[in-house]
Amino acid sequence: MYARDGVEQACLGLQAACGADVNLLLFCCWMGSRRRLLDTRFLRRAMAAVSRWQSEVVQPLRRARRALKTDGVGGPGAWRAHLRANVATLELDAEYVEQLVLARLAAQAARPVGNAGAEETIDANLERYLTLLGARSGVVSRRRLRILRAACAPRGI
């Protein structure tokens, strides 16, 4: 899903605007595309399951990768670039571990919603997650949410 048109920018925009976890955004979309409505309690469990991993592993790797972009941290540029590439690989591996944790939780999610379509379920999951983050409606771009829904909803469902 992340490689589809506009999804990366939409996810990173929501990450910057309201602290959304990209993997949780994609999880909400993925579950919604299967018409699995995530209630507040389940989303809180999912957030708690990945919170410590995010704060203690993923975010420090992300900060290190970003710091290595600039001359301000010192060290030869070629070595910084080499180290930055290695840290980026580690960051992606850490993100994958988070996805595995969320995939395990998926088996415990509610069964598919009877009458709701995938688009409506994706919207509901994203809205519920962003509400739990305390995102104000003015901060959350409706355009970003539309991009995610369009990229993640199976056609004709």
Image (tube, rainbow, N blue to C red):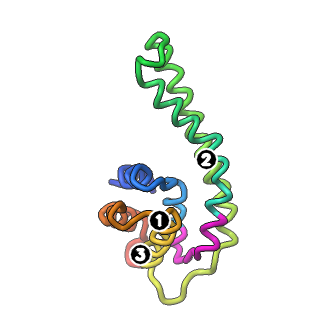
Which residue is disc 1 drawn over? Answer: 130
Q: Is residue 38 magenta?
A: yes
Instruction: Determine whether 150 is above or below 39 in the image.
Output: above
Residue type at numbered disc 1: Leu
Q: Are marks 1 and 2 in contact (CB under 8 Å)?
A: no
Q: Is residue 12 magenta?
A: no
> At 61% from the left edge and 53% from the top edge, which residue is drawn?
99
Q: Are marks 1 and 3 in contact (CB under 8 Å)?
A: no
Residue type at numbered disc 3: Glu
115 lies left or right of 42: left
- Picture coordinates of residue 33 (x, y %)? 49, 71
Spatial distance from mark 1 to mark 3, Cα to Cα?
16 Å
Q: Earlier in the sequence, mark 1 or mark 2?
A: 2
Q: Secondary structure at mark 1?
A: helix
Spatial distance from mark 2 to mark 3, Cα to Cα?
28 Å
116 lies left or right of 100: left
Q: Earlier in the sequence, mark 2 or mark 3?
A: 2
Instruction: Determine whether 58 is above or below 138 in the image.
Output: above
Instruction: Determine whether 65 is above or below 45 in the image.
Output: above
Spatial distance from mark 1 to mark 2, Cα to Cα?
17 Å
The answer to which image quadrant residue 18 occupies is bottom left
> At 32% from the left edge and 66% from the top edge, which residue is drawn?
142
Q: Secondary structure at mark 3?
A: helix
Residue type at numbered disc 2: Gln
> At 42% from the left edge and 70% from the top edge, which residue is drawn?
153
Crowdedness near tag 3: few (<14), some (14–19) or many (≥20) residues, C-alpha within 10 Å? many
Which residue is disc 2 drawn over? Answer: 54
Q: Earlier in the sequence, mark 1 or mark 3?
A: 3
Q: Which residues are magenta?
A: 31-45
In the drawing, what numbered circle is on residue 119? 3
Image quadrant holding the C terminus, namely: bottom left
